[in-house]
């Protein structure tokens, strides 16, 4: 007999969701064998899941390769519409972009990644395709570091146990010790700065958006390039505007905004 906590657990559903999440901009289409390998399933199981997803309208195939359909967007839209985060944040993000001339994004934490829930771009400054729904490793992004900094000690240790912590550039934090130290710094400052840890030549800053319970529910961030903005300008000019925008969004969400901290 299954343990009580597993009696209501539908493993096929989680495997189906794993199949959907296996597709990305790096893997927009895959063969049956590739899906099975990426998700860690047998070919027969992967085939049944793909055919089920195809029947439900989430996957399409040309008889050899499988890819997602636009219907998958409905899953993300259901989440976004329930949060109202994007709607509340939009005017503040628009104002921030107009004030600074830099692009702005909002993200939430999903396991070991940050997921973009809103974005106001200006011009493309990175090779990464950053759109709503984009997933990036939390440890290498300023928004991720803001979100990780709000985890409880036990939650942070659980994250450090699960996360792969890939070293994306020579500056990427890649050890639990480095990440714990950075998280303490982010808590003290009230914002995060990442200098070429996600991609060479790319800098970003982020601040927390607080919910009604006084915990971080999202992060708002701005990105720029090494050639266009110095670290000194980021800290002295952009950080105050970003922190103010995050505080305004928090206020609109009913969050308790902490007193402004000195950098």
Image (cartoon, helix red, strand yellow):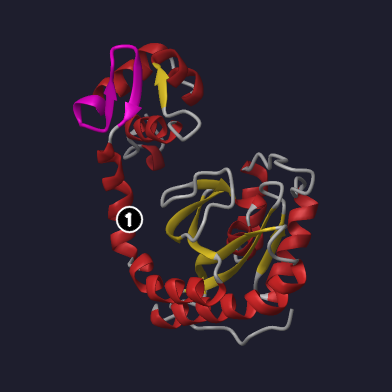
From the viewer's perspective, is 138 left or right of 72? right
Question: For residue 48, which quarter of the picture?
Answer: top left
Verify whether residue 13 appears in magenta. no
- Above/below status of 17 relative to 84: above
Query: Left of 15 or right of it: where is 105?
Result: right
Q: Is residue 93 above or below residue 38?
A: below
Quick check: can you spot residue 263?
Answer: yes
Which one is nearer the viewer's eye here, 226 or 246? 226
Q: How many marks?
A: 1
Assign the N terminus to one quadrant of the image: top left
Locate the C terminus and report the quarter of the image it occupies: bottom right
Q: Is residue 95 above or below residue 123?
A: below
| Residue at x 34%, y 37% (from the top left corner) | 7
Q: Residue at x 28, y 16 (%)?
A: 62
Taking 127 as reference, is 181 left or right?
A: right
Image spot of residue 210 (x, y percent) = 50, 74
Q: Position of residue 38 (x, y in %)?
A: 50, 24
Horizontal and vertical percent position of residue 40: 49, 22
Q: Identify the residue shown where x is 40% and y is 12%.
A: 43
Queried whether the magenta region covers residue 63, the answer comes back as yes
Dot 1 corresponds to which residue?
Answer: 79
Report the front residue among 223 and 185.
Answer: 223
Secondary structure state at the residue bearing disc 1: helix
The region drawn magenta spans 53-68
Residue 192, image quadrant: bottom right
Q: Residue furthest bottom?
A: 259
């Amino acid at each position: 007999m299954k343990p009580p906590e597993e009696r209501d657990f539908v493993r096929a559903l989680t495997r189906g969701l794993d199949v959907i999440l296996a597709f990305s901009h790096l893997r927009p289409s895959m063969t049956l064998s590739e899906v099975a390998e990426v998700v860690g399933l047998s070919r027969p199981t992967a085939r049944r899941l793909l055919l089920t997803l195809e029947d439900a309208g989430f996957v399409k195939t040309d008889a050899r390769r499988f890819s997602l359909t636009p219907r998958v967007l409905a899953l993300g839209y259901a989440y976004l519409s329930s949060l109202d985060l994007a709607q509340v944040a939009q005017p503040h993000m628009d104002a921030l972009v107009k004030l600074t001339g830099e692009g702005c994004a909002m993200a939430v934490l999903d396991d070991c990644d940050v997921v973009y829930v809103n974005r106001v771009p200006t011009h493309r400054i990175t090779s990464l395709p950053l759109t709503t729904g984009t997933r990036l490793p939390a440890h290498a992004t300023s928004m991720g570091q803001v979100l990780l900094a709000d985890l409880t000690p036990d939650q942070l240790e659980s994250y450090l146990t699960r996360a792969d912590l890939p070293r994306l550039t020579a500056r990427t934090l890649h050890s639990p010790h480095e990440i714990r130290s950075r998280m303490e710094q982010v808590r003290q400052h009230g914002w995060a700065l990442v200098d070429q840890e996600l991609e060479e030549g790319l800098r970003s800053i982020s601040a927390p958006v607080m919910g009604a319970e006084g915990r971080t529910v999202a992060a708002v961030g701005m990105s720029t390039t090494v050639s266009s903005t110095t670290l000194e300008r980021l800290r002295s000019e952009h950080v105050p505007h970003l922190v103010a925008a995050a505080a305004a969004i928090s206020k609109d969400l009913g969050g308790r905004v902490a007193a402004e901290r000195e950098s």
